[in-house]
Image (cartoon, helix red, strand yellow):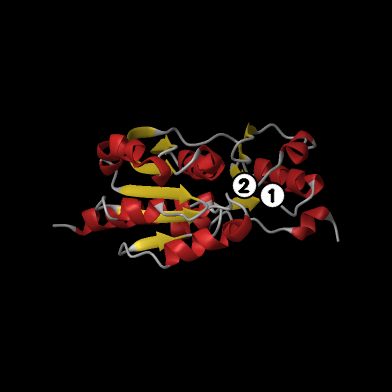
Amino acid sequence: MSVAEEFVLDFARTERIGMEETVYAAGKSAEQIDAILAAAAERGARLFLTRLDADKRAALAHELDYCPVSRTAVFGGPNRVAGVARVAIVAAGTSDVPVAREAERTLAYAGIAATLIADVGVAGLWRLQRRLDEIRAHPVVIVAAGMDAALPSVVGGLVSGALIAVPTSVGYGVAEGGRAALDAVLASCAPGITVCNIDNGYGAACAAMRVLHAARALRELSP
């Protein structure tokens, strides 16, 4: 089997769900990724890549807009980001920023403006209080937090917009690579929180896009 026979790209995904296909680079060889990019180039298509480490990026023949913090890359150019930011991405600590940046880059690729607010975790609640009005100005809020992941519950009790929690693998010992954070947000007392998988900033951004798509559809249905 040739490398080109090892993948089938879903170019019709945007028409079905309003989001383009994304390439999950982890587990793929540089040869496989280059073949995927070549297939996209033949169609004049662009692609978003996640979990692309720096060493694998260096081995690729194609030019990419690469972010080493989030380990994401854009092939073929993103949409132009325009308009007021409708999504706030809140990172509990600096260590949670890679996950937050993955969400931010995913939204930017789709042309959606977002505001990244970092280091406002519960260990110093005054930092969150100082940015609360800014967070509330966004109809959708993504919160990335590790360790005990208390921040999504706190924010969930303070903002009225859609809230998407991303537990992160930040922590050690009983944090268990993010399992404690995941359990905490799943058991949150704050009602209506959407929960993504551990470290899944991409999934959180896609959930935010679905909320925005639904809001747009409701406006279109209004008489």
The label shown at residue 158 is none
Q: Is residue 94 above or below residue 177?
A: above
Residue under numbered circle 2: 50
Position in image of residue 135 (x %, y %): 30, 41
**Residue 17, can we see it?**
yes
Residue 23 falls left or right of residue 116: right
Q: Quadrant of the C terminus?
A: bottom left
What separation in Å lies between label 2 and label 1 (alpha carbons)? 6 Å
Q: How many labels were placed on the picture?
A: 2
In-front residue for pair 71/40: 71
The residue identified by callout 1 is 25
Amino acid type at image mark 2 = Thr
Q: What amino acid is labelled 1 in the image?
A: Ala
Res. 176 visible in picture: no
Q: Residue at x 49, y 43 (%)?
A: 100
Element marked by disc 1: loop
For marks 2 and 1 on the same chain, the one whose residue lies earlier in the sequence: 1
Identify which residue is drawn at 64% across, 55% down: 9
Residue 19 position, x and y percent, is 48, 52
Q: Quadrant of the N terminus?
A: bottom right
- From this viewpoint, which residue is outermost toward the bottom? 187
**Residue 169 drawn above or below residue 42:** below
x 44%, y 66%: residue: 186
Q: Are the two marked residues, 2 and 1, in contact with CB atoms closer than 8 angstroms?
A: yes
34 vs 85, left or right, is: right
Number of residues whose C-alpha sits closer than 10 Å to that of mark 2, classed few (under 14), some (14–19) or many (20 or more): many
Secondary structure under badge 2? strand
Task: Determine the image quadrant of residue 207.
Answer: bottom left
Single out the residue that lies furthest toward the right. 1
Between 139 and 9, the one lying in front of the other is 139
Residue 191, percent from left and from top = 30, 64
**Image quarter of residue 184:** bottom left
